[in-house]
Amino acid sequence: MSLFDLSLIKKYDQSGPRYTSYPTANNFSKFTQIQYEDQVFLSNNKKGPISLYCHIPFCDTVCFYCGCNKIVTKDKTKAKTYLQALFKEIEIQSKLFDTTRQVEQMHFGGGTPTFLSNEQIILLSEKLQSAFKFANDGEYSIEIDPRGVDQNTIKALIKARFNRISLGVQDFNVDVQKAVNRIQRFKQTKTVIRIARENGFKSVSIDLIYGLPRQSVTTFKATLEQVAELRPERISIFNYAHLPELFKPQRRINILELPSADEKLAIFKYSIDFLLAQGYIYIGMDHFALPEDPLAIAQNEGHLYRNFQGYSTHSSCDIVGLGLSSISQVGNSFSQNEKDLESYYQKINIGELPVVKGQTINTDDKLRQLVIMDLICNFELDFGKIERNFAVHFKDYFKDAFELLTQMHNDGLIELTDHSIKVMDKGKLLIRNICMVFDAYLATSKTQFSKTI
């Protein structure tokens, strides 16, 4: 398999959405609790499963590369106040949903969820379990920072029903770690993963970033070899987008230490080749998984899904977002909570959901959403599927897209026929570019996106 074609990557060098949703979050506008409740009513009629997402915004140190919605503090008492509000939000949300619906998926993200004490993590999980009906065999994951995790933490996570962990690593090279203010030793990370596996965790996911200051192919090669030793079930390798005008911590990065564009691409190419040689499957959008991982199996069987947490096997779940800035996907809508902590608290304290913006999905959105989802998850699109679901003629509906699609076909990114699109190996790294052809909002968007590669 040859995924990397430098000439094509340079030809299609542009910025674009990551398509964790369609329409993407930058298109959201004012959205009310009444609108949200109407969507829950529609959702309850379908009686499908639920996915819960809890956002814990706190970190005790700042990583200079970070673009997440976070609050940097060493004051642990802030977590207590936050949990009090989060518990109230859980109570409001749970009363809206049919009590027979099962939670098949739960994820704690951030920030740093392990900023919470062991006791607080257990209390939050128990609160959710008392408010919602949990499946016995669900997928329950949490992002952890190995620097603050020990055996007691792992045992607490097990008690809180978690069975999957995700670890931020970014890079094991000490010089790179110093440049981004995240010192995390390999031995420390290895110990945490060993303890997690010994205590029954089903899956370990590791996040890496390429394009950080002081990185080179040589330094990142050593990091990849260490990651291979850990053999995580899933690996994500994200492109560092240096946008200091949007993310203040990035202003502390020395731009003279960032790798050149050519070196950055060389790091990515080496990483792809290395992981494929290690037996990982390229899932798409920077994600790799072992062949026996549920993500790889779902992709092989054609029912992989993508949402705000990345790739998922739970396409039938409505997502209930809880906490600061979290995003819900319920019924025919997306909705996002307040991003400002005080505004979040104010709404919770008067008994309101902290929903501030969102979007109701129309028929055109649904159609394009299915097109983009099939391409980004399964690398192929059957026109007949779209035509059957929406009573349209695909070529007529997307007549303006076929000039670009034909160009992509001629460049070897896709195989375009009268009935389908199949993404070729050379096109898999440029899947965002392919999906952008079908994005009705992109032409008028003023959002500054990251580079597609």
Image (cartoon, helix red, strand yellow):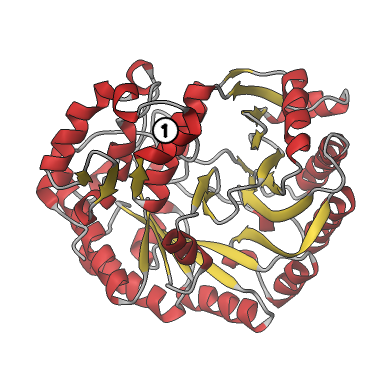
* Quadrant of the snapshot with the N terminus: bottom left
* Quadrant of the snapshot with the C terminus: top left
Residues 275 and 71: in front is 275
Residues 334 and 40: in front is 40
Asked if one can make out residue 130 in the rendered structure from this viewpoint, the answer is yes
Residues 200 and 84: in front is 200
Residues 448 and 244: in front is 448
Where residue 299 appears, x then y in whole percent? Answer: 44, 59
Q: Is residue 79 left or right of residue 448?
A: right
**Quarter holding residue 247:** top left
Tell me if residue 196 comes above or below residue 213 in the rendering.
below
Q: Is residue 55 left or right of residue 174?
A: right
Q: Secondary structure at mark 1?
A: helix
Kind of residue sitting beneath label 1: Glu
**Quarter holding residue 339:** top right
Where residue 187 appears, x then y in whole percent? Answer: 49, 79
Where residue 260 appears, x then y in whole percent? Answer: 18, 48
Identify the residue shown where x is 57% and y is 51%.
Answer: 61
Q: Is residue 235 left or right of residue 355?
A: left
Q: Is residue 66 left or right of residue 109?
A: left
The residue where tag 1 is placed is 387
Tally of numbered discs:
1
- Specify few, some or many for label 1: CA neighbours under 10 Å numbering under 14, 14-19, or 20 or more: some
Identify the residue shown where x is 80% and y is 24%.
Answer: 347
Tell me if residue 326 comes above or below residue 48 in the rendering.
above
Where residue 414 appears, x then y in whole percent? Answer: 21, 46
**Quarter holding residue 269:** bottom left
